[in-house]
Amino acid sequence: MSVRQNLRDFFHGAAYSTYERELRMQAAELNDMFLLLCYMEVVGLPNPATLYLLDVYPYLLDQFHMWHKRMGMERSPLGTLPCC
Amino acid sequence: MRGLLEKKVLFFGGKGGVGKTTCASATALAASHAGKRVLLVSTDPAHSTSDIFDREIGPEPVELLPNLWGLEIDGALESRRYVANVKQQIKGLFGDHILKEANKQIDLAASMPGAEEMALFDRIGGLIRGEDTRFDLIVFDTAPTGHTLRLIRMPELMEAWIRALSRSRQAMLGIEQDDKTDPVLMSLTGRLEGLREFRARLLSPRVSAFMLVLVAERLPIEETARALEQLNEAGVNVGGLIVNRILPETSPDPFLQSRHAQEVIYLDEIDRRFAKLSRVRVPQLPSDVHGVTTLDALSEILVPQAQPSSP
C-alpha cells in the first residue's frame, strides 16, 4: 500500500470515524425495532401481520443472530427462536 | 334491486338465520341466468351453500350449474396451504441450515391464534382483486355480521401495519445500504400493493355492494342498524336491504294474524329507519328454499329483470 493511500485512509478515519460509529449504532437500533415488530408474537404480543411475514423470516434469521450476539448473549435467548 | 348484477363483488350479510345463504344463492343464480359467470363463495365456517344446492362444494370452485360455481372457504385449510406455499417459495433461496430453522419458525407462527382468519382474509382478498379471471361476479355468502365486519375492516388495519413495517425497514436501509434490492422490503411493498388494491375494490361502489338481509323482528332490526352504521363508517357501499320471510296478509288463523299485526309495525319501523336504502320485501314462501326451482322463485323477487327467457 502506498504512502498516499495510507494518508488518505488516515484522514478519512480522522474525519468520519465518530460519525460512522454513530450511524452504525442508529442503524442497529432501527434494525432491532424492525425485528421486534416482526417477531412480536415471540415476546407474547399479538401481531396481525404474522402470515404476511412468513416469507421474510429466513432473511431475518441472520439479523436475529447478530442481535443476540450484539446484546452479549452467546446463544439465542428465545427457545422458540433457536437460531444457533 | 337494479344494477346489482352489474357489480363485480356482492356481499350478503346479516344476523344468523335470516336467510343470507338463500338470498346470496338466489342472486348468484339470477346473475348466472343473465349470462354472467358467477362464483358463489361461502365464508361462514358453518357452510350451508352445499345444503341448498344439495351437493358437495369444496375449497376449490365447483361448477354447480351452467355459469354458476360454488366455493366454500375453509380457514384451517387455507392456512395450511398458505404455509406450504411459502415453504415452497423459499426453498431454492436459502441453504439447508437456514431453511430448517426458518421452517420451524414458520410452522410456529402459523399455529398462532388468528392465523386461520388471516389466511381466510388473504384468500378473500385474492378473489376480490379478481385473481381468478374465470368469473365476472363473485357473490359472498358471509358469516353472521360481527365476523364479517371484522373481515371488512381488516385490509385497512393490515395496510397500516405493513406500511409501518416497511417504513421502519426503509429507515434502517437508508443508513445501511441500497433499499431497491432488499428482499424484505420488496416483499413488504408487494403485500402493501395487494392490500391497497383489495381495499380500493372493496370500497369502490362501482365494484362492490353489501346487501343486508333481515327479517321483520326486533333483534335483526337492531343488528342491521348497527351493521349499517359500521359499514358506512368503513366506507363500504351498501347496496340495499332485503326484508326476508314476510308473512301473508290474509290468514284466518288468529296466531298468524297476531304475528302479522306485529310484523306490520316492524315493517313500518324498517321503512322509517332505513328510508335511505333501497329495500325489497320477500314473502314467506310456502316451502323452505332448497334446490334450483325454489331458488328461481326467489330470484324473480330479488332481481326481477334477470329471469331466464326460456325454461
Image: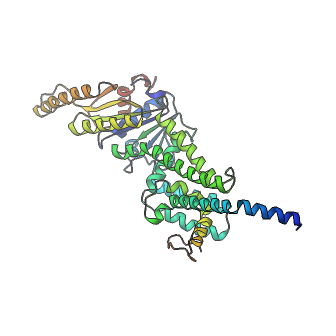
Q: Position of residue B184 (x, y in %)?
A: 62, 55
Looking at the image, the residue that sits furthest to the right is: A2
Q: Is B13 or B100 nearer to us in this picture? A: B100
Please tell me whether residue A44 is drawn above or below residue B164 in the rendered image.
below
Q: Residue shown at 42%/59% (left/top)?
A: B113
List x then y, in percent, for residue B200. 51, 36
Q: Give the tally of numbered discs.
A: 0
Residue B15 figure quarter: top left
Give the residue at x 32% y 24%.
B276
Location of residue B86 with respect to B226 vertically, above or below: below
Q: Is residue A56 left or right of residue A46?
A: right
Query: Which quadrant of the view contains residue B235?
Result: top left
Above or below, comparing residue B161 to residue B292 in the picture: below
Q: At x 58% / y 60%, what residue is drawn?
A: A31
Q: Position of residue A9 (x, y in %)?
A: 80, 63
Observer able to see residue B66 = no
Residue B40 position in % (x across, y down): 45, 40
In what quadrant of the picture does the N terminus of chain B appear? top left
Q: How is the image coloured?
A: rainbow
Kindly identify the residue that appears in the image at 50 percent across and 33 percent down: B8
Residue B210 sits in quarter: top left
Q: In the visual, does B152 lie left or right of B102?
A: left
Left or right for B229, reference B124: left
Q: Nearer the viewer, residue B306 or B287?
A: B306
Quarter occupied by the C terminus of chain B: top left
